[in-house]
Image (cartoon, coloured by chain):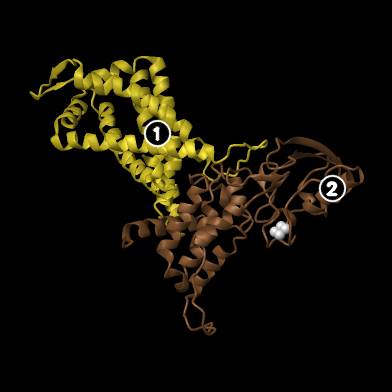
Amino acid sequence: MSLKYSSVTKKIVMSLAGLFLTSFLVVHLLINLLILFDPTRELFNEAAHFMATNPLIQTFQYVLFFGFILHIIFGLVLQIQNWMARPVRYEKKGSSEQSYFSKFMIHTGAIVFIFLIIHFANFFVKAKFGHVEALTYPSGATYEDLGMLVVNLFQDGAYVIFYVVAILLLGFHLDHGFQSAFQSLGLNHSRYTPFIKLFGTLFSVAITLGFISIPLVIYFS
Amino acid sequence: MDLTLKIWRQASAEGKGKFVNYQVQNISADASFLEMLDILNERLVVEGEDPVAFDHDCREGICGACSIYINGRPHGPDRGITTCQMHMRNFKDGETIVIEPWRAKPFPVIKDLMVDRSAFDAIIQAGGYVSVSTGGVPDANAIPIPKRKADEAMDAAACIGCGACVAACKNASAMLFVSAKVSQFALLPQGRLEARERVQKMVAKMDELGFGNCTNTYACEAECPKEISVSHIARMNREFLGAKLLSEK
Ligand code: FES
């Protein structure tokens, strides 16, 4: 289906979907971080409860899912076309790329995708269809203790390593993707582009450190 | 200096092709890269061998014919320069230089280092022009154009269509070339009239010919002998988006 769209249209779809997914990462990270700031896990569980029950967010879940599908399918189509555009490879490979991680978008993307599936099975499916112990807090509120699920998973050293590596790769993916999205949308300006690039890199570092800090703190405490 | 040249030899478009090693001795550091290949070819002719075929024409950096991929870089080491302007002082004595043709599906090899770049002509034919009706010669200053715009259009028009952007791009994308041509017209009032159709037609042609998609690696800008900026790619994306959203049909 995406074959009939022009290369530029595909890139525009990629960037819009990518930026949208990035905004989702921010929300996700902010909620996750709650677990570090509240040992009783009440804040986190409350937020998770809100996300799982709020009708607006529930509807938004489908939009998010659609965003993922678009980004993945278009990314694959673009990559396959790009491989086909050079049937005979160079003997001496070039390395003139000025955006370093642009070389590895398909690789970092693929690993993040695998991570996503495992992550989905570990949390989303369990939270939605499995049984999670409920906890009543002194405040009187009762929430499913999803925070415990997180804490338990992060006791496993191998899982923590996998998680950290996947997030690092996600960071690399973001570092190229963020500024690339603006370029694809035609938003390039001698005054603002250097700022977008710098912001993208700082943003990627912040997101990466944010996500990575959670398993590390839980594992080592 | 003495050098080992590892050159791609391919007898014809249908031929299989392989790398062949040649030794060249006593090459002056002041010789240009093409002169060095001339020296090799003269020897090959004397020895009764087939000389290495490569494209060249002006040898002064303005025609874009000399398209050679040298040690992993289009037009070799050194920035902002074509192969014919690149000198042997960029190499070390005893070095092995890997010499390949441009590699891209729309640029098939004709012979050795020569590729067929008519795909670029086809893109230009699709819309890279301004239609003018005949008539008297218009006054050069009748249409006021801000200096900044004129300069930017001129920077885009500096593209010599050599194809280094395609050769350098890991996706064999022609976006820098096409965007330079789109920009050069889009920036000027004479080009605005057909801007919407132009960008759509040229992008469609580029895709049809089998060039890859741009992933913003910016390798093209780094290797362009005319140092054309990727900001033109952004302008083309803008033009394209605008044309798609606003065109009447
Ligand atoms: S031969 Fe004309 S640019 Fe090199």
Q: Position of residue A40 (x, y in %)?
A: 20, 22
Residue extending furthest toward the right: B46
B115 and B223: which one is in front? B115
Chain B display color: brown
The residue indicated by pointer 1 is A208
Chain letter of disc 2?
A: B
Residues at discs 2 and 1 in contact (Cβ within 8 Å): no
Q: Position of residue B75 (x, y in %)?
A: 68, 50
Split into quadrants, the picture shows ligand 1 in the one at: bottom right
B46 and B5: which one is in front? B46
Q: Quadrant of residue A135?
A: top left
Chain A display color: yellow
Q: How far is disc 2 from disc 1 in space, using C-alphas?
A: 56 Å
| Residue at 68%, 61% in the rendered image | B63
| Residue at 46%, 34% in the rendered image | A106
Is A145 left, or right, of A152 in this rendering?
left
Q: Are marks 2 and 1 on the same chain?
A: no
Residue extending furthest toward the front: B14
When the figure is inspected, residue A185 is found, relative to residue A125, above or below; the finding is below
| Residue at 58%, 37% in the rendered image | A87
Quadrant showing the C terminus of chain B:
bottom left
> Under tag 2, what secondary structure?
helix
Chain letter of disc 1?
A: A
Question: Residue B41 has which mark?
Answer: 2
Is B18 left, or right, of A128 in this rendering?
right
Residue behind label 1 places its C-beta within 8 angstroms of ligand 1: no
Crowding around mark 1 (Cα neighbors within 10 Å: few <14, some 14 to 19, many 20+) is: many
Q: Check disc 1 and give the amino acid type.
A: Thr
> Under tag 1, what secondary structure?
helix
Is residue A191 at least partly visible in the picture?
Answer: no
